[in-house]
């Protein structure tokens, strides 16, 4: 069974009532089956086709046609006054909720790209991190199709809405000698989607290009560079090529990294050792975080959900605390902190502790003023630490 991707809008409905916000979305519709003899299953949460395993035990993922024509609306229910859906920590996530988060990221990126191209801001290096469970490579539920859906929505926004030429860049296995599992197949599937969609896009598809993460791949008429999940691995760091790419670009064309993992990975033979370390660290720090979404968990665990760290350009960094009652399962998200810069783990932990103490009932036998006094002292201490 093939899929046809079309764009429409998302109706955002809050669980407590209130305003409705309409945003663009892409809907994957099932088209005619490719062949009658293939037993195929379609996953609601995953935008992919899973074929029956062959004798080698391989699983086939078919390309997805991506068009930019709208048809229908989908309603997304948000929790209270928060920007989160009820299935933030659920896998597979419903397709409409996926699109809600994809739209938020895309709007933030588009705003930052517009400011870069207009000269309003100087930093052309843009970082995007979206670590929902199905995009977290440390979990076994990682879904590359979710990442590709996000990439295609960004491409649509740049090409269809702004008439820009986008070069989608990925790590090259022939150059690096191997790829991490989270990156393997991204280039092949993206190019398969592109070829399948060429007829419906027409000449606009000529502005969607692919290439390796390399300064050599930069063309004069490329307007935006979208780098998919660049990841350093042992003995094969990609950061040097990212630095070369940034140097080749004139500083006025945006470079967007999507879910980059450019941490230091020391290896043998002097690879990523002391030499050049400062330059690499400075390069990673030079990226402007236009969009960030990460679920917060207890240390060393992936459950239960404690809250979320969120930032979408041009807004501030936000720390949200998740609460769920054991009796009826009702849940809520509460904004407990805003920061101009990315908060440290200590700042996040302090904000959570202060909020939990503030909302906890006073111990029996003690006046409420005593509990309020301790809470006020903790708030002042928290303010002094983060001043």
Image (cartoon, rainbow, N blue to C red):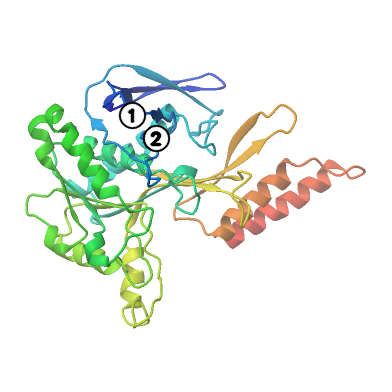
Residue 203, quarter of picture: top left
x and y percent of residue 251 in the render?
18, 59
Are the residues flagged by discs 2 and 1 in contact, CB closer than 8 Å?
yes
Residue at image location 57% in from the left, 21% down from the top: 16
x and y percent of residue 259 in the render?
37, 52
- Can you see residue 114? no
Q: Is residue 19 above or below residue 51?
A: above
x and y percent of residue 368 in the render?
83, 41
Q: Quadrant of the N terminus?
A: top left
- Can you see residue 33? yes
Q: Nearer the viewer, residue 172 or 113?
A: 172
Q: Nearer the viewer, residue 186 or 52?
A: 52
Residue at image location 40% in from the left, 70% down from the top: 264
Task: Identify the element where label 1 is drawn.
Answer: loop
Q: Which residue is mark 2?
A: 52
- Disc 1 crowd rating (10 Å Cα; few below 14, some 14-19, many 20+) is few
x and y percent of residue 224 in the render?
18, 48
Q: Which residue is mark 1?
A: 38
């Amino acid at each position: 069974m093939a899929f046809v991707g079309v764009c429409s809008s998302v109706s955002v409905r809050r669980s407590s009532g209130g305003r409705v916000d309409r945003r663009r979305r892409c809907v994957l519709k099932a088209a005619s089956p490719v062949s009658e003899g293939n037993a195929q299953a379609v996953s609601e949460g995953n935008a992919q086709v899973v074929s029956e395993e062959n004798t080698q035990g391989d699983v086939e993922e078919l390309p997805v046609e991506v068009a930019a024509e709208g048809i229908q609306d989908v309603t997304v229910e948000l929790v209270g006054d928060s920007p989160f859906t009820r299935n933030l920590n659920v896998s597979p996530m419903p397709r409409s909720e996926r699109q809600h988060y994809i739209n938020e990221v895309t709007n933030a990126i588009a705003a930052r790209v517009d400011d870069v191209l207009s000269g309003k801001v100087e930093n052309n290096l843009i970082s995007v991190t979206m670590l929902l469970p199905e995009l977290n490579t440390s979990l076994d539920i990682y879904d590359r199709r979710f990442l590709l859906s996000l990439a295609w929505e960004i491409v649509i926004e740049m090409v269809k809405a702004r008439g820009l030429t986008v070069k989608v860049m990925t790590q090259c296995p022939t150059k690096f000698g191997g790829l991490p599992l989270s990156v393997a197949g991204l280039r092949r599937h993206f190019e398969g989607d592109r070829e399948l969609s060429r007829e419906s896009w027409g000449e606009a598809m000529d502005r969607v290009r692919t290439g390796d993460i390399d300064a050599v791949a930069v063309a004069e008429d490329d307007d935006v560079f979208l780098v998919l999940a660049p990841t350093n691995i042992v003995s094969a760091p990609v950061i040097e090529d990212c630095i070369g790419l940034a140097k080749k670009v004139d500083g006025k064309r945006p470079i967007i990294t999507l879910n980059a993992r450019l941490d230091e990975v020391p290896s043998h033979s002097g690879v990523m050792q002391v030499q050049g370390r400062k330059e690499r660290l400075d390069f990673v720090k030079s990226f402007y975080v236009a969009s960030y979404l990460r679920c917060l968990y207890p240390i060393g665990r992936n459950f239960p959900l404690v809250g979320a760290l969120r930032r979408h350009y041009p807004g501030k960094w936000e720390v949200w605390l998740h609460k769920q009652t054991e009796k009826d399962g009702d849940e809520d998200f509460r904004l407990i902190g805003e920061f101009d810069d990315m908060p440290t783990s200590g700042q996040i932990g302090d904000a959570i502790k202060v909020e939990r103490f503030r909302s906890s009932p006073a111990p029996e036998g003690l006046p409420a003023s005593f509990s309020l006094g301790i809470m006020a002292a903790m708030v002042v201490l928290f303010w002094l630490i983060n001043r």
